[in-house]
Image (cartoon, rainbow, N blue to C red):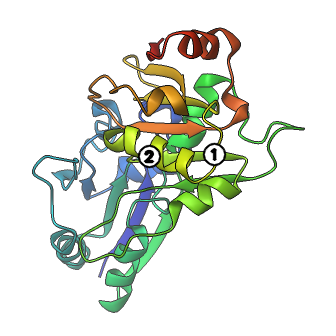
Amino acid sequence: MGKVYLVGAGPGAPDLLTVRAARLLERADIVLHDALVHPETLALAARARRIDVGKRYGKVSTEQRFIHRALVEAARTHETVVRLKGGDPMLFGRGQEEIDALREAGIEVEVVPGVTAALAAAASLKASLTRRGIARTVAFLTPRVGRGESASEWVGAALEADTAVLYMAAGASREIAGALIAAGKPATTPVALVESATLPGERRVFTTLAALAEAELPRAEGPVVMCIGEVFRQPAAVESVLENPHIRTA
């Protein structure tokens, strides 16, 4: 019986992979990876069989139950199994479900953390999520609801936190902005959206909740995080959308 490692691939850039993650990939026998893992990261697993089990919103995706079965079977036939997940395995990555499935099958599992997209976006924006005097609390949220799941009260959590970062939210950005304003969040609250953080094709959008509630976002090809709070206020960008309610892209 082999061992499974749930490894965080980070936000995208291969050189943000942890040393432990890189070493595991180099000695892996088989790698089951997410859809958006960078090719250079996968190239580290030169001796491994590589299987794409990724999920993409609005596209054909691998069922989670299939991933569970594949992990169990891989551990029964290989010594070192790497489940390579975008960002950090324990944040919106269904890591706990995979851990539970492996434990139920009697398979040893270890988690190797990775840099999550919220921290990568903050680094790109050079904006501290907990800037002294402005933000003492941070919430990582998602408005998305999986099959068979009940909706969570994400709006309340976003209101209570000084800084909120929403994952898997770009497709419903207008609805999200409207819901936050309706719940009492100031319409002038700054919003920064970062697509494909840390990669050469990274795009950043600066706006406010008011402008976001009125304008459609440009179509995103990569993963997007929506960052909300005063720590993201950039005077020139915010003034431009207040005077003219169109989104400004950098």
Residue drawn at x 31%, y 32% is 222
Looking at the picture, does residue 161 appear above or below residue 38? below
Q: Which is more toward the observer, 191 or 22?
A: 191
Q: In the rendering, at what x and y percent does residue 8 appear?
A: 45, 52
Badge 1 density bin: few <14, some 14–19, many ≥20, Cα 10 Å: some
Residue drawn at x 65%, y 54% is 159
Looking at the picture, does residue 131 appear above or below residue 25? above
Q: Quadrant of the N terminus?
A: bottom left
Looking at the picture, does residue 194 appear above or below residue 21? above
Is residue 250 rendered to the left or right of residue 134?
Answer: left
Asked where in the image residue 76 lies, by quadrant, the reply is bottom left
- What is the CA distance from the residue labelled 1 to the residue labelled 2? 11 Å
Q: Which is more toward the observer, 165 or 18?
A: 165
Badge 2 density bin: few <14, some 14–19, many ≥20, Cα 10 Å: many
Label 1: which residue? 185
Amino acid marked by disc 1:
Lys
Label 2: which residue? 176
Say whether disc 1 or disc 2 marks the residue closer to the N-terminus: 2
- Callout 1 touching callout 2 (CB < 8 Å): no
Q: In the rendering, at what x and y percent does residue 239 appear?
A: 63, 12
Task: Assign a secondary structure to mark 2.
Answer: helix
Is residue 231 rendered to the left or right of residue 14?
Answer: right
Callout count = 2
The residue lying furthest to the right in this view is: 133
